Image (cartoon, coloured by chain):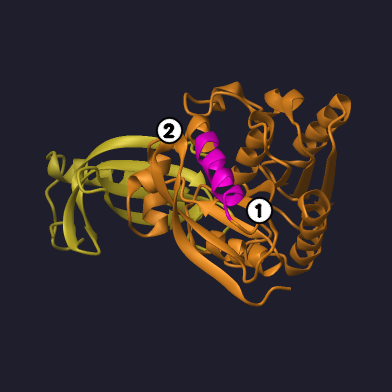
Chain colours: A orange, B yellow
Amino acid sequence: MYRGLVGKEIKYKGHDGVEKNAYFARPEGDGPFPGVVFIHHVPGWNEVCVETVRRLAHHGFAAITPNLYAAYGEGDADDIGARARAEGGVSDEQLLGDVSGSMAYLRAQPNANGKVAVMGYCSGGRQTFLAACRLKDVNAAVDCWGGRVMVKDKAALTAKQPTAPIDFAKDLNCPILGIFGNDDKEPDVEQVNKTEEILKGLGKRHEFHRYDGAGHAFFDWSRPSYRPEQAMDAWGKVFAFLNKNIG
Amino acid sequence: MCSYITEKSAIMGSAKGRRGWMSVDTAVVYYDHPTHVPLDHALNIDFVDSRSHERVAVELSADSARELVARIQAALDSGDAIHLGSREPSLVDGAGR
């Protein structure tokens, strides 16, 4: 455990070299620290996401959560999230640019060990899977209940999110950890099983954990979906996976 | 679910938000994770002034949203009957206010 932390809002260069804000936290000390880019979920760049970055720092990681909605300015996270949603959300191309810029920020820190994982919940899980396939320098990926990695109805694909991430699975070039609740509807058990089957077929390094008595978003202590027993077990899996692959 | 799937409707009306009354021109409707109501999924409606980006948000359970749709339709039908002349408003049934 690292009880002393450095936590602050920082500027980094995101998609197309545009300067954007992000929240960054790392343990105090010289390191070297492995890095984690935590991708916030659709509802916004909110307190739960910032707290998640602090938790990662508490366990020895230099972590950053880029504000994917930076272009919408300041305001309550839920209001900004609602505006982004109404405009179709973040494009996959912007996401990849913002994650890539966040990874560069982490690797540029003097106390970095040079290895960086990407992690996200829900839509951020989908985007984690996408980034792990499309970016060449991701060292590990943690997909927590990423919805629409596999798209059942192609009509759900949009101009901003034109491709199901599973279609890029052959390009996955890092180990991936999957955390899922068996009561989840998106992704449901069938989608999780199919995703794992595809990764196995492609010979991709993966580790999937499924939890009974849990549905979607069971890490989120601010919502009734929170399942403390399953969440704490899964956090143990997350830290073990990260320490093994980027520590 | 956590998707960006929304239904949008151009509207003409007003809503009372944190700074008082404002005109709203767009309703954004989605069934997804809410921010406040203690449900995994809710029917969420944002009444938005697209110029200022201010919004008035509501989050409803699916059942209460369906009931609300029916009540809105009933109120509109009743209002049409009254205000389009099929019957006069009555102070007895309170419809004249």
Q: Left or right: A44 with respect to A178?
A: left
Identify which amino acid the numbered label 2 is placed on. Answer: Asp
Identify which amino acid the numbered label 1 is placed on. Answer: Gly
State the extent of the magenta-drawn residues as a range.
A96-109
- The residue closer to the viewer here, B94 or B25, is B25
Residue B38 visible in rendering: no
Q: Label 2: few (<14), some or many (≥20) within 10 Å?
A: few
Q: Looking at the image, is mark 1 or mark 2 earlier in the sequence?
A: 2
Q: Are marks 1 and 2 in contact (CB under 8 Å)?
A: no
Percent position (x, y) of residue B6?
Answer: 44, 37
- The residue closer to the viewer here, B83 or A197, is A197
- Quadrant assignment for the C terminus of chain B: bottom left
Mostly what secondary structure, the magenta segment? helix
User: Can you identify the residue that label 1 sits on?
Assistant: A35
What residue do we see at 64% from left, 59% from top? A111
Percent position (x, y) of residue A20?
Answer: 41, 47
Q: CA distance from mark 1 to mark 2?
A: 22 Å
What residue do we see at 26% from left, 48% from top? B53
- Subunit of mark 2? A
Q: How many marks?
A: 2
Residue A32 part of the magenta-drawn span = no
Q: Secondary structure at mark 2?
A: helix
Percent position (x, y) of residue B40?
Answer: 59, 55
- Quadrant assignment for the N terminus of chain B: top right
User: Can you identify the residue that label 2 sits on?
Assistant: A16
Residue A116 visible in rendering: yes
